Image: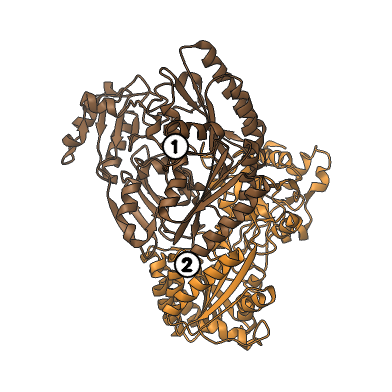
Chain colours: A brown, B orange
Amino acid sequence: MAADGEGTTDSSSICRHAHHAGWEDAVSVDASDIEEHSFSEWSTSNSDTRPVAVVRPQSTDDVSIIARICTKYKVPMTPYGAGSSVEGNFSSPFSGVCLDFSEMNKIIAFHPKDMDVVVQPGVNWVTLNNDIKSSGLFLPLDPSPTAFIGGMVSTNCSGTNATRYGAMKDYVMSLTVVLADGSVIKTRHRPRKTSAGYNLNGLFTGSEGTLGIITEVTLKLVTVPASYGVALATFDNLRNAASAASDMIRSGTPVAALELMDETQMQIVNKNGGAGGRMWSELPTLFIKFSGTEATVKDNTKAIQTIAKSFACKAFESASNEEQMDALWSARRQAYWASLAVRDEGTQVWSTDVAVPLSRLADLIEICQTRASKLGLFNSIIGHVGDGNFHQIMMYNPDIPEQKHAVTSCVNRMVEDAIAMGGTVSVRTATQIHRMRFHTLMQFQGEHGIGLGKKVS
Amino acid sequence: MAADGEGTTDSSSICRHAHHAGWEDAVSVDASDIEEHSFSEWSTSNSDTRPVAVVRPQSTDDVSIIARICTKYKVPMTPYGAGSSVEGNFSSPFSGVCLDFSEMNKIIAFHPKDMDVVVQPGVNWVTLNNDIKSSGLFLPLDPSPTAFIGGMVSTNCSGTNATRYGAMKDYVMSLTVVLADGSVIKTRHRPRKTSAGYNLNGLFTGSEGTLGIITEVTLKLVTVPASYGVALATFDNLRNAASAASDMIRSGTPVAALELMDETQMQIVNKNGGAGGRMWSELPTLFIKFSGTEATVKDNTKAIQTIAKSFACKAFESASNEEQMDALWSARRQAYWASLAVRDEGTQVWSTDVAVPLSRLADLIEICQTRASKLGLFNSIIGHVGDGNFHQIMMYNPDIPEQKHAVTSCVNRMVEDAIAMGGTVSVRTATQIHRMRFHTLMQFQGEHGIGLGKKVS
């Protein structure tokens, strides 16, 4: 490429370097292809700029070649996985090329006896778990069913299972990473235990593509539990529910998931015709999952019931056969969809994401609910309370300045309160809220990453 | 300090900058103080060089001032905690000043309801657990009882509890770190869940002081289990014992610890008069710990027994009252002491530290035992097999070249085999083996860190 190309983005530089067999097929400059790879309806943040090309590498070597060329000509690179980011992670605000990993979707090696698997970043986690099902092993995280392993590593994904199983960083044993200049590093060998050398797995996991491009991942797997259980506890008020949740965690009783829905969320489920073939008490409700041997599940359910009772729990139901468990969990599963279904035309959803130390969880939830209720707008609370993390969902019309201002002020105060309580927040500014219509395509989970959407500028 | 001081180490530079109230007391140039802080009988690696001064900071600010001065005058800094390193972590090969953290030994804040505690690096973990005992919480790691939190973070310590509870990196919620130039960073706020920003906790944990000096640590605590159980299973041969251990992990049955001792280790315990008031079968033996509710412990013990039986286990004993548990675990606890007690005059211990993927554990253990047995020297195998990690202990006389050569060659081949199996090793070269006499002061654990002792030069 001529010197005048330096610092600019020109798809021809990529195409002209396409000496590799098949490179022509791997580089696309098709307008709709480019559009799909840099804009999405379900992202909270989109850039007006587009990449000049979409490249589909098939191997670590391909990615290394692309990075070498891009660095030489100062062309920005944006990795793209499932495209399910809700925070603009695959926006290309400085143009450049988009690296689409959909063709790097192979399971490279599965070692059931070592309880690990080596995969390319374009592998979908649901597909992976189905493929290895007969081994009795699985990757225990549960982000959006659309998610690819590469994105799950990049965002350090979690989900409702995080209470028991932790986050993606706890399952990454080794990474192959292509650095910006095209050099390839491998973070570790495969054994489950090592404390030698810097913990590069932990550094690259969650770094959202800012440190390098992940091209191969060795994942630790765990054994599918022998049995499961689900329980549900309703409370007179939100404070009791949140306090009970904190106490359940502090008791050390192993729960697989611990989720909270406030009375508004439960009402909405009923408004949508119920869930699991029934209507629900419109009270603050805790949803709890258990896993382990049959006796362990029974034991833990009993321990959790005792705690619920000590917080004046109104009703406690539990189930351990699959059908009943599904029914009990259905209200939790449908919560977010149900919220969107009751949304008025023109309304947008502002969903917050804060976490505080356990002892302040009930305080903050109560403050936020009281404050938001005064606005006269829809608001509800739903949370992965096992981690001290919850979301307050507020709906407002962005074309009505008073509503926009009220919600903004409410969120700002929530953020201030959370930080004052020693908490952590993912901040999203009002101007970044748009096109939330398909947020619901994503499973609503603990931390959605930062991306452009929650980057503090 | 005069310009001629640049790049040299001169204790007077520290003393002359001692404008801070009480700095004179904080800086020691006493020869025996210096000797104690840079040489130890129990370290595998000692340098001939000594620091010029030992400084005892009392706060993050003190450490920041020290770092600023040292960086200005290019004086090396070596942090010193409990001094219990077996790998030369506190050697000062380039002289400089030693920072002794024994006066930064305060519990700054304990939040039982949040299940966390904020401590200075000079806090001893046993003291910490005793101080917070009444809360029902504890830090579940078990390195040497002498260890300080600062060193535990720096080396990402583990121990026999790692099978259930993981390593130090899983308990570090936030760190205050003084960088080389004296700047102070805090890695995180306190909540248990966050995936925003780089995982600096994971990077500093295990970095052994190479990236910064840790001055404050927020630790996640866990609930003390309601009950415990201990079991012991003996096998006809080592392969069956190791294979059973791998299967126990793969079964997903939650075990708190899973340790292996070979027939030689069991013989040695008996030679020393037994343990726990009895003599033991001189067979390869697995020691297993359980924790949880009473029913969970019972359930898990049964599941483990079934697996042991499928590997032709000769005997299976279990206990759940404290006295009997202590007795059953006593042989494991005394293993290393017993080995040292039978050691001949002039003999040194070479203890290896390798980990391989679970499926190769039995293979490698068998190969190593067979190979070492041909040398006619003492050798035994003991391991945290729950992680695929084991140690082979060999004794030899370093003054007899044939013995030294034989052991070296044996270790080299073990290392090659482990790496060929996709494993990881901590390498220690023969020339670095000396003064192992008090190795036994340390609890013999999974990974002892790298330090100078296992640094590949």
At x 71%, y 38%, the residue is B65
Quadrant of the image occupied by residue A149: top left
- For mark 2, name the chain: B
Label 1 crowd bin: few (<14), some (14–19), many (20+), radius 10 Å: some
- Near-viewer residue (A113 or B62): A113
Amino acid, disc 2: Val
Circle on res. A274: 1
Residue A125 vertical placement versus B410 (above, below)? above
Three-letter amino acid code at disc 1? Gly
Horizontal and vertical percent position of residue B110: 72, 47
Q: Which type of secondary structure does the marked residue at label 2 adopt?
A: strand
Q: Position of residue A427 (x, y in %)?
A: 53, 28
Mark 1, chain letter? A
Would you name the residue on which mark 2 appears?
B354
Tell whether B2 sits left or right of B360.
right
Q: Are marks 1 and 2 on the same chain?
A: no
